[in-house]
Image (spheres, grey):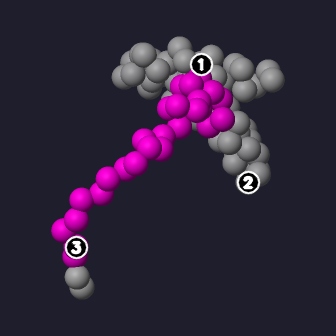
Amino acid sequence: MVYLNSEIIHIGKGTTENIWTDLQRLILIEKSTRKFYKKYGLYYQYFIIRPVQLVYLLFHEPHLFFITLKAIAKSLFK
């Protein structure tokens, strides 16, 4: 096995930060997560697991809690 000792340079800073806001990104994640649970017949588990995750965010990452809550509300009622 051969390992190359080379440097990687990213040109153009290809991130989604320039395209989407944090709220838009979280809305997309919420929609995708619900779609996954629904596809595999576990939709009820989403409504059990998500509140537990929100409580975790509230105590461990409060700066993300309110934006995540807003993303959930927007993705549910759009």
Q: CA distance from mark 2 to mark 3?
A: 42 Å
Q: Dot 2, crowdedness within 10 Å: few (<14), some or many (≥20)?
A: few
Q: Nearer the viewer, mark 1 or mark 2?
A: 1
Q: Which residue is mark 1?
A: 69
Q: Is residue 58 left or right of residue 28?
A: left
Residue 45, can we see it?
no
Q: Which residue is mark 3?
A: 4
Please say if 45 is above or below 25: below
Q: CA distance from mark 3 to mark 1?
A: 45 Å
Corner quadrant of residue 61: top left
Q: Position of residue 52 (x, y in %)?
A: 53, 28
Q: Nearer the viewer, mark 3 or mark 1?
A: 3
User: From which residue to which does the magenta span run?
Assistant: 3-29
Residue in view at x 55 percent, y 18 percent:
67
Q: Dot 3, crowdedness within 10 Å: few (<14), some or many (≥20)?
A: few
Q: Which residue is mark 2?
A: 40
Tell which circle, 3 or 1, labels the residue nearer the N-terminal end: 3
Q: Nearer the viewer, mark 2 or mark 3?
A: 3
Residue 76, can we see it?
yes
Name the outermost residue toward the front.
Answer: 11
